[in-house]
Amino acid sequence: MTLDSAWLVPDWPAPARVRAAVSTRQGPGVSQGAWARFNLGARCGDAPEAVVANRAAVRTALRLERDPHWLQQVHGVDVADVDQPGDGQEPRADASVTRRPDEPLAILTADCLPVLFCTTDGRAVAAAHAGWRGLQAGVLEVALNSLQAPPAQVLAWLGPCIGKASYEVGDEVRDAFLALDGNAAEGFEPTRPGHWLCDLAWLARRRLQAAGVERVYGGGFDTRTDDRFYSYRRDGAQSGRFASLIWLEG
């Protein structure tokens, strides 16, 4: 699969049938104003018809056999198994999994961390949305378990999220992570009293490695400073959303 510079393709040694891509604001979209131009989020104030057109452009650009499985993300830990019959509505979940070909999974973010998973035998893929709440609550571990494979036989890729230098949080965030793992303190750097710079990608990598995932790739992004991506911290409530997608080729 060859894509133009409007897309980011994960650099990881996934099996050949595992395909993945991340959209950017420069994609073939029609959104205008604060959402220009390739917003894929349906709940951030953009014109609904623009989002529908943009999502259709995803399917065309990636040559997908069907529309991606979009989620109604709520900063929780539920996983949608898209291989099971549904009601036609977007599931309220923050991760998804499939073992069937041509069932693209999609995670929407604008500073939170998207994480893509695949098994080394190429039989299953999963995707997760990890803001600090979901990450602390265990969404990555739940997504990992949904693959039903030994963690040593799973690859993970950390997509674009807010970088440590751009992400200041309060004591409550640091305390929540340290309550589970005292060594998570390494993921925080003090700034002003009661506030810390938080390395979301580092914390995710630590959680995955603790769960037994030895091969973790990606990271090194900062959505707040990289204008290819939407950023809630930079753009506010009218920030659009970009998508991280993964699927098994038929």
Image (cartoon, rainbow, N blue to C red):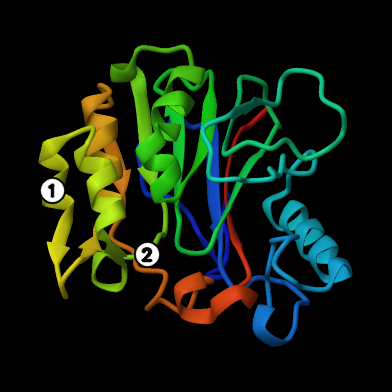
Q: Provide residue 59's location: percent of width, then percent of height.
A: 75, 51
**Hey, which quadrant is residue 29 in on the image?**
bottom right
Question: With respect to residue 143, does 223 lie above or below?
Answer: below
Name the residue located 77 percent from the left edge and 40 percent from the top edge.
Answer: 90
* Label 2 secondary element: loop
Q: Earlier in the sequence, mark 1 or mark 2?
A: 2
Q: Nearer the viewer, residue 198 or 15?
A: 198
Residue 231 appears in the rendering: no
Identify the residue under disc 1: 185
Which image quarter holds the C terminus? top right
Q: Nearer the viewer, residue 91 or 176?
A: 176
Answer left or right for 91 relative to 138.
Answer: right
The label number, if any, that marks residue 22 in the structure image: none
Q: Provide residue 223's location: percent of width, then percent of height.
A: 42, 69
Name the residue located 45 percent from the left edge and 63 percent from the top edge.
Answer: 111
- Tag 2: Cα neighbours inside 10 Å, few (<14), some, or many (≥20)? many
Identify the residue under disc 2: 162
Residues under labels 1 and 2: Cα distance?
18 Å
Answer left or right for 51 relative to 227.
Answer: right
Q: Provide residue 50's location: percent of width, then percent of height.
A: 83, 71
**Hey, which quadrant is residue 80 in on the image?**
top right
Q: Nearer the viewer, residue 7 or 225?
A: 225
Inspect the image, locate mark 2, and give the three-letter code of the amino acid beneath it: Ile
**Hey, which quadrant is residue 242 in on the image?**
bottom right
Inspect the image, locate mark 1, and give the three-letter code of the amino acid beneath it: Ala
Residue 148 appears in the rendering: yes
Answer left or right for 47 relative to 185.
Answer: right
Q: Nearer the viewer, mark 1 or mark 2?
A: 1
